[in-house]
Image (cartoon, rainbow, N blue to C red):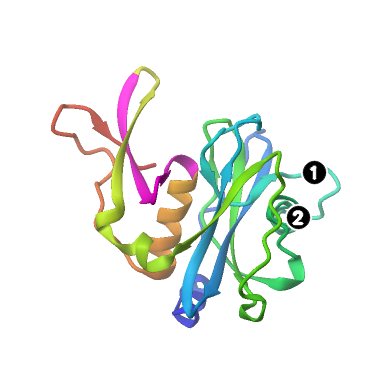
Amino acid sequence: MITNIRARLAAYQPSVSDPNGNPRAAVLVPLYTHRDELHVVFTKRTDRVQHHRGEISFPGGAMDPEDPDLVFTALREAGEEIGLISDHIEVIGRLDDIVTISSFHVSVYVGEIDPGHSPYAWRPQHFEVAEVLEVPLPHLLDAANLVEVPRQRDGQLVIMEGFRFNEHVIWGATGRMLRNFLDVAVAPVTSPSPGTQGTNGTKRNIS
């Protein structure tokens, strides 16, 4: 599977947009083989961080002035947040840029953790990371694990796509990145179409 993912990412032309003055940030989508099964690694944010408290995220954060590029930012943040050593991961592709609700312009990179370091000795940064989640890729591809997440946006109720894993729900910006990764690199999953109307008249939106 990882060979196919690499090939599809290599062929993909990501949507890269102008930040228009928004602060730059980068995240890493870590792919991790454990017990012969491919996983995607997420973090659960603590309630002490400034943005997106308690939510499920990919490792990442704001670009520092001294960072030479955004790939470096993604790897540096992964090291700081979960103890992922940059020499243990290979960046294998890039996904579409997104702008978060907190106005960060985020570049998204996919990396494969060296299987020789499995099981990985995660070292979460306790102020930022409450938990490291290893989610099996087949779980994310199972449409039975898709849920609807209602949220108020600009005074309107929108229904966002979410991915359930145990008691957690992956949604919002991370859900958008995950959907982009699954559609581009793995396989499409049946899901609500953006902009369609829900049964109660609310707008559906997975972006």
Mark identifier at residue 10 = none
Mark identifier at residue 64 = 1
Indicate which disc, 1 or 2, sits on the residue closer to the N terminus.
1
Q: How packed is label 1: few (under 14 Cα within 10 Å), some, or many (20 or more)?
A: some
Residue 18: horizontal and vertical position, in percent? 61, 43
User: Can see residue 13?
Assistant: no
Left or right: residue 124 versus residue 139 is right
- Magenta stretch mostly in which secondary structure? strand
Tell me what residue is drawn at x 33 percent, y 63 percent: 141
Q: Nearer the viewer, mark 1 or mark 2?
A: 2
Give me the C-alpha separation between circle 1 and circle 2: 10 Å
At mark 2, the secondary structure is helix
Kind of residue indicated by mark 2:
Arg
Left or right: residue 51 versus residue 95 is right
Range of magenta residues: 156-173
Q: How packed is label 2: few (under 14 Cα within 10 Å), some, or many (20 or more)?
A: many
> Does the CB distance between marks 1 and 2 fall below 8 Å?
yes
- The correct choice, above or below, for 128 with respect to 80 in the image is above
Left or right: residue 97 versus residue 172 is right
Left or right: residue 156 versus residue 8 is left
- Quarter of the figure with residue 142: bottom left
